Image (cartoon, rainbow, N blue to C red):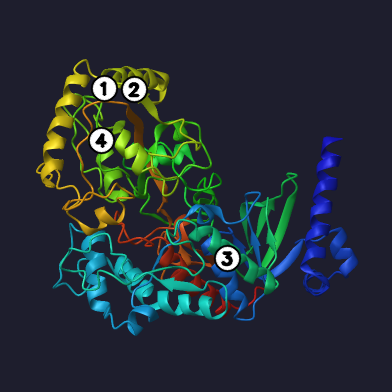
């Protein structure tokens, strides 16, 4: 009986796909199989046929499908989750576009040789050589970075011209390493969706709305609840379609006459892959819950070569929300508050709290070889009533949140001693996930000493230990603080002598991972011998990034995604239609 139900569900799914594909597509599918349309509906080899099948409905998937459609191809988008947008829907959606048209109009030069030096310096600092023909990068890394530069702006302009992604230029947003001498255009590369609010925190929602509206207008079906489980190949090894499970667990098979493009995100929420590949203890992240590394597992049997599996786009995250697998979690893009500092379980301050989020997260991975522990595995953010009152915000993953919002991560104490007891109680609750982390016996006096030293620095505006606030990006992500006349460093202010005080437990997480099957500059997935797997493409965080460990700037995830969606769609268009 159960088999009959599954069979009936599968038949219904196949009928629904042929109906939704339209009479024309159904007729094509039938003709391809040598059947009448009615016979194809009853027993098809494929349930529908398209030129391009796109897996994933975030920026990479939506843009790939649109670029393919504008080349005259039919396309469908399959989304594993019940709603569209993936991680894009949670993002601020800054996108980093070198040599963009707005820069040119503003007279901001961004020559390609200078751009490549900047990204090479950050992506492979151990091999960087400005005198080398490829700047010390491997041929693959160099070619991928070069292709990004060449295609990001044309892709962006096409999306804008078609009304899919109108943008505005935020010329004052700096690159994350704007002070490096290699960065000859430290500002001007960042764009945001035109209708994003002034803080730009809702850009992802705006982008998904405009991109998906254009996709539907262009006749591109978007099917949610469709988890792709297998890539189908013909006898020659050419990819000819996919097999998916719908929300009733029925199997649906879709033919791709030209190409299958994966844009399904990374493996943030696959604990096994995180543990086996990432180079530090990661507790989860703010990627969409559906980002479970599906493409890594699907592409493996096809012989795909993996690259950059040890790195991710990282950020600090609240421990409680990570353990709860809270789908609403946001990475801490902005560590808010001026009368605020971080300490570890020993009560010692040992980091610049305002470091850009990717770099700050890396400091949680420090290993103490003598004690055989990660001393900073869990850090404690501590702030006072002043920061609570003037720096609270629900945007950009800030820990200091306004009254009435979700503050389950916040620990409170009338005095520092009471706060320390409450912190230890909270740590005990999560001991099973932290290796039994608890406060050291001398935590309280060490915390008091750390605050006293920090307060001295805050009075002068010079952090002699960690140089907090001396880089432009640290002030960019400072968040709101109380105005203080004549203050030189807006990121620092002394903590109050008396409570109440607040704290939160912070661990390392990801925006998403950045490793997976290796692709060439056209988005074609490569096998172990660097040969394209015919008909198979990948875009975004589900495939390997040539950025290495680097996070070049705000939007350095989405800029390349748009560029390679464009290149993949163009290459897919050039594919001959399969005969299968």
Q: Which mark is residue 342?
A: 4
Q: Mark 3 and mark 2 in contact (Cβ < 8 Å)?
A: no
| Nearest to N terminus: mark 4 or mark 1 | 4
Q: CA distance from mark 2 to mark 3?
A: 47 Å
Residue 159 point in image, percent of width and height: 52, 75
In this picture, residue 25 sits left or right of residue 304? right
Q: Find numbered disc 1 in the image and state the secondary structure of the residue it sits on.
A: helix
Residue 219 position within the rendered picture, expressed as x and y whole percent measured from the top left: 70, 72
492 or 46, which is in the foreground? 492
Q: Where is mark 1, residue-wise?
A: 416
Give how far apart the Cα atoms at labels 2 and 1 are: 7 Å
Q: Distance between the Cα atoms at labels 4 and 2?
A: 16 Å
- Which of disc 3 and disc 4 is earlier in sequence? 3
Q: Closer to us: mark 2 or mark 3?
A: 2
Label 2 close to label 1 by CB (< 8 Å): yes
**Displayed quadrant of residue 177:** bottom left
Judge from the rendering whether residue 341 lies leftward or rightward of residue 513; answer left or right.
Answer: left
Q: Are marks 4 and 2 in contact (CB under 8 Å)?
A: no
Give the image location of residue 27, x and y in percent. 82, 73
Could you tell whether 82 is left or right of 284 in the image?
right
> How far apart, in angstroms, are the residues tagged by discs 1 and 3?
50 Å
* Sooner in the amino-acid sequence: mark 2 or mark 3: 3
Residue at the disc numbered 3: 62
């Amino acid at each position: 009986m159960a088999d009959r139900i599954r069979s009936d569900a599968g038949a219904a799914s196949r009928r629904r796909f042929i109906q939704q594909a339209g009479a024309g597509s159904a007729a094509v599918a039938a003709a391809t199989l040598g059947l009448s349309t009615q016979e194809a509906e009853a027993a098809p080899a494929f349930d529908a046929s398209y030129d391009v099948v796109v897996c994933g409905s975030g920026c990479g998937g939506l843009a790939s499908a649109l670029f393919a459609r504008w080349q005259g191809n039919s396309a469908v988008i399959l989304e594993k989750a019940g709603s569209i947008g993936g991680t894009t829907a949670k993002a601020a959606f800054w996108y980093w576009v070198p040599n963009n048209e707005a820069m040119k109009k503003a007279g901001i030069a961004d020559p390609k040789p200078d751009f490549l030096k900047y990204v090479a310096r950050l992506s492979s600092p151990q091999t960087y050589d400005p005198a080398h023909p490829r700047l010390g990068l491997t041929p693959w890394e160099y070619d991928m970075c070069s292709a990004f530069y060449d295609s990001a702006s044309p892709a962006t302009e096409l999306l804008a011209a078609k009304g899919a992604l109108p943008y505005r230029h935020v010329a004052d947003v700096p690159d994350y390493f704007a002070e490096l001498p290699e960065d000859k255009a430290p500002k001007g590369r960042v764009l945001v969706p035109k209708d994003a609010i002034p803080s730009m925190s809702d850009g992802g929602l705006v982008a998904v709305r405009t991109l998906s509206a254009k996709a539907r207008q262009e006749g591109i079906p978007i099917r949610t609840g469709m988890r792709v489980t297998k890539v189908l190949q013909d006898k020659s090894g050419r990819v000819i379609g996919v097999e998916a499970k719908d929300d009733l667990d029925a199997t649906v098979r879709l033919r791709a006459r030209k190409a299958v493009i994966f844009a399904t995100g990374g493996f943030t929420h696959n604990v096994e892959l995180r543990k086996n590949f990432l180079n530090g203890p990661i507790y989860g992240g703010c990627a969409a819950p559906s980002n479970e590394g599906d493409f890594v597992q699907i592409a493996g049997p096809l012989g795909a070569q993996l690259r950059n599996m040890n790195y991710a786009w990282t950020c600090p995250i609240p421990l409680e929300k990570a353990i709860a697998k809270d789908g609403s979690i946001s990475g801490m893009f902005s560590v808010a508050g001026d009368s605020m500092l971080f300490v570890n379980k020993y009560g010692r301050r040992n980091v610049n709290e305002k470091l850009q989020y990717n770099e700050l997260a890396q400091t949680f991975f420090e290993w103490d070889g003598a004690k055989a522990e990660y001393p900073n595995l869990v850090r404690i953010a501590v702030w006072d009533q002043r920061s609570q009152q003037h720096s609270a915000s629900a945007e950009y993953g800030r820990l200091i949140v306004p009254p009435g919002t979700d503050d389950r991560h916040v620990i409170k104490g009338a005095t520092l001693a009471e706060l320390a007891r409450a912190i230890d109680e909270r740590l005990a609750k999560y001991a099973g996930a932290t290796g039994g982390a608890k406060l050291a016996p001398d935590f309280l006096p060490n915390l008091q000493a750390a605050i006293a030293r920090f307060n001295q620095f805050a009075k002068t505006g010079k952090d002699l230990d960690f140089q907090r606030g001396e880089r432009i990006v640290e002030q960019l992500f400072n968040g709101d603080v109380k105005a203080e006349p004549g203050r030189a460093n807006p990121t620092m202010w002394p903590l109050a002598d008396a409570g109440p005080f607040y704290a939160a437990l912070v661990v390392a997480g990801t925006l998403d991972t950045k490793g997976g099957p290796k692709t060439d500059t056209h988005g074609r997935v490569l096998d172990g011998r660097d040969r394209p797997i015919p008909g198979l493409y990948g875009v975004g965080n589900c495939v390997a990034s040539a950025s290495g460990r680097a996070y070049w700037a705000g939007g350095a995830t989405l800029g390349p995604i748009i560029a390679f969606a464009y290149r993949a769609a163009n290459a897919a268009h050039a594919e001959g239609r399969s005969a299968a």
